Image (cartoon, coloured by chain):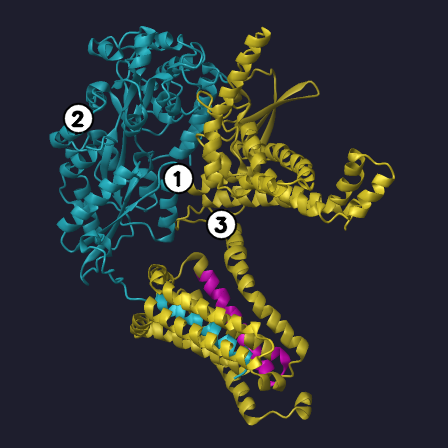
Amino acid sequence: MLGNAFISIDPKTKNLIRVTSVWHIVLAAVALILGIATAAGSVLLELRGVLRIVLIVICIFTAAASGWAVYELWGFRRRGRTISLVVNYLGFILFFVLSLHFLQVFIDIDKLGETFGRGLIALVGVVIGYLISAFGDRFEGKPELSQQYSKVGKWVALISFFVFLLLVGIIPAIATLISRMANPFIFSLVLMTAVFGFFIWTIWREPSAAALKANNAHKEALDGFLFLSPNLLGFLLFFAGPLLFSLYVSFTDWDAFGNKNWVGLQNYAKIFNLNVQPMDSPDMVVTEVLDTTVYDELTRVKLLGKNFMIGAQDKLFWISLRNTLLFGLLAVPLSVIPALLLSNVLNSKIPGMKFFRAVYFLPSIAATVGVSLIWQWLYNAAVGNINYFITVAVNFFNSTFGLALVDPQIRWLSDTKTALIAIVIMAAWQTMGYNTVLFLAGLQNIPKELYEAAVVDGAGTFRKFWNITVPLLAPTTFFVITTSIIQALQMFEQVFVMTNPPGGPNNSTLTVVLYLYQNGFQRFKQGYASATAWVLFLVIFGVTLFQFQRQRNSEAYDI
Amino acid sequence: MNRKLFASLIVLLVTLSMVLTACQPAAPETPAEQPAAEQPAAEEPASTDEVTLRWRTRPDNQAEIDVYSAISEELDAEMDGVSLVYEPGGSESSSYQDVLKTEIGAGTAPDVFWIPGTDVADFATRGLIMELSDVAGDFDTTAFYAGPMFHLTYNPETGANDALWGLPRDVSTFALYLNMDLINEAGAADPRELAKNGEWTWEAFLDVAQKVRALGSDIYGYGANAWWGPYATWLNAAGGGFFTPDRDACALDTEESIAGLDFERSLYVDYDVAVPYGEDSEPPFLAGKVAMFQNGRWATPGVRANADFAWDVVGLPEGPNGPGNWLFWGAYVVNANTEHPEEAWALAQKLTEASTQAKISALGTNIPSRVSQEALDAFLTFTPPDNNQAFLDGIAAESNPTAEGPLWVGNWPEFDAIMGAKVNAVMTGELSVDEFKATICSEANKVFQQ
């Protein structure tokens, strides 16, 4: 090895790297056997469905990566260090989490909540210790006194923490933990955690890093990935994993309880199965035009003087898509334009403005379900406050000016013509405050000099707003519009809570997310719901891509 | 030891200490000042050979939660070798069933739980609940009302009634909650008197509703919420219904069903006597603006607590086919994955015993599902309303109630969604009854082809 000619490796380090190589040989062999046993459906590993596939993939990855690590480590190459650390780190995390699970730590953590109060008094001691230590900083000119304070503070904090542990029950906890570890299975999990931890150490240590020719860039990269790993693992486990799983499920008829058959593109075909038929007269009944064993009437259109009926195998999907897009079309401008205007008002330096900023932001942090229930009451056609005030206003105008206005008695949530608008108003009200805060942040980035120059040039308030504020807020506006559109296309909670039945009346507020929820959780159709989710994903992705494209093509100012 | 290493060790020590402290023994120490009698039974350490059963219902309010908790503790004491843990589920609006299904999927659902009658088939055919006939032996199912038991003993494989999926927790029928102040003010006849004299018909009902409606633009003669229950009773009283007798096809387009639907439509569209369809009718009723509010027994506690006007209940008016009503019910079923089927079955029996049902009935929300005078007497003691008998009359065979039931062929939630949307369109005048008749079954029958 060329590298070895220049770097002398001490025997201990060399042996540790060799032992790690042997460990990877063993690991690769075990992973291979486990993978084959799982694939063959061994009695010992009767895993079903996705779990089986996941285990096989993990085994293949471990075997391949370990084999590669052996090859690279044997040659004392840097890549061997990276691969070995990744494999052992993932193994350590896996066995550590399994150990905690089987030691019931995740369940017992509740008990910490119960006993935590008993130790609070000792935590006060920790705080006092810190204060004593911090007090020492006041004696800058007397280092000895400062050090003494620091030392006393540390000891007070340390002793108090020890007392805290005793009070919350560390001794019976350790006894319980040890008794649980007496179980051979749990003990082997803990042992494996320690083994993986040991082999991380053998390769991570400085002499090993030098022996494997790790330079600073390499070490920094690994440090970076180490810090990134909690988020990265969380993303892979809780986002990317379920995402891929839902893609797989969308090709099945899974009902969420184990009954699953591969149906290929059938779910997608059902969603997109449309039928357009000409009609002899516009009054024809659906049964005369379409094969109603397959299709339902979606809508009627008149094109070039001819009448057509459009049927869909799943008309509810198309109705929900139409409602969702319509909702976005109405709710986004209603939550963005007022927010832009409001942020300009709130950006002024008038006393008490911070209070109003907080007031307008409140709806965004209020719980959606609670807010929706209140709006449901406000919208009640018979006893709701909104209709009450309309009635009062109508009566006032009629009596004062001798008019004959008719009280509209709007059925906000029970009329197909107004239900979606009612939801739009409520949603726009709720998101406007958040958008306002974003615009405020954008406004505060605009240099004041530009406005001063504009004033010198004789620009009025509107000209300043139109020619300075709006163009320079473009990046913020882009962000606000994009996130508002994505949020609007995922509308669920408000409709679910406010309408009865959810999506009513007559499906006029049924959104795609609500529809897929109903299919997945109420009609036992997880496969179909997943397919719907992926179609919605493509719609959102398309709209967002279009937004980005437009943004790139425009000459937006970037401050 | 450098500072960095020292700091790292401290952080590690603190983290590990917290984790270690979490591993405490199963039974927490009892604080000295807390009386032993106040300790919940569930927290007492179970003996090693004791079976722990978790069970769940969908209570409507805190009072019910308290009664169910007390019942759980009593049964816990009665059942040797069994320790019970009661878990109150969410309300219907907080998706009790959705949460339950998710827990079943995750394998964390309770051993015994309550589900609505319409869900029994879905749960049974997917193997989520246990078929109990083997553990039940010669259990006497005739002790319960026949309607619910027909569905709970149906065997989809044989088509016979030789299975057992659970036991009904309670039943309920519809009645009209009356605002007597409004009715008297309008000078309309007292519906209770009309019912006594056998004159409580659709025409008499409409007459009362119209007279009350004439009191003001914000006063309504009738109110009901927009779900399948209320309109089902109008269809029923006209001799119609949702399904064919075999429950494997849509029957919403029969002459009888259409007659019932048309009468209800006329209340909203032609005569304009009802709270607009789709609006929650309970708030205006409680605000004293609705004369006749159609709802089940479950609404009674809310009316008792909030109505500050003279109120009572009366049975539903008779239609062209005589009286009609609906028998709502839900059942205690056993989780198919329970490790203790025999104990779970014993618990289901205990929960539906006459004495247990009497305690729950005394709360006023539930009508006993067991044909037991003890339980019915307990139910009748709960007044107001004075005319509790109206609910029991609705259960009687003479009232021709249709028992709520699952669809063993087809998909009930989908049928409900299709039917509900179309009925909504009819009630709001967006769809004519003729159009409804021409299209409803071609659309709804698809759910039987799945």
Label 3 marks a residue whose chain is A
Q: Position of residue B204 (x, y in %)?
A: 30, 8
Q: Name the residue under label 2.
A: B380
Q: Colour of chain A?
A: yellow
Q: Which amino acid does label 3 sit on?
A: Val
User: What element does badge 3 sit on?
Assistant: helix
Question: Magenta region, mostly helix, strand or loop?
Answer: helix
Q: In which quarter of the image is the C terminus of chain B?
A: top left
Question: Disc count in the image?
Answer: 3
* Image vertical order of residue A156 relative to residue B448, above or below: below
Q: How far apart are marks 2 and 1 (CA)?
A: 30 Å
Q: Mark 1 belongs to which subunit? A: B
Amino acid type at mark 2:
Leu
Magenta stretch contains residue B157? no
Identify the chain of the residue marked 2, using the numbered disc in the image: B
**Residue ID at (50%, 41%):** A366
Instruction: Mark 1: give few (<14), some (14-19) or many (20+) Cα within 10 Å.
Output: few
Q: For the point 61% across and 28% down, which residue is it?
A: A276
Q: Is mark 2 on a helix, strand or loop?
A: helix
Q: Based on the displayed image, in which of its 4 quarters is residue B32 positioned?
A: bottom left
What mark, if any, has residue A249 been given in the picture?
Answer: 3
Which is more toward the observer, B17 or B442?
A: B17
Q: Give the range drawn in magenta.
A: A52-80
Tell me, what hue is chain B?
cyan
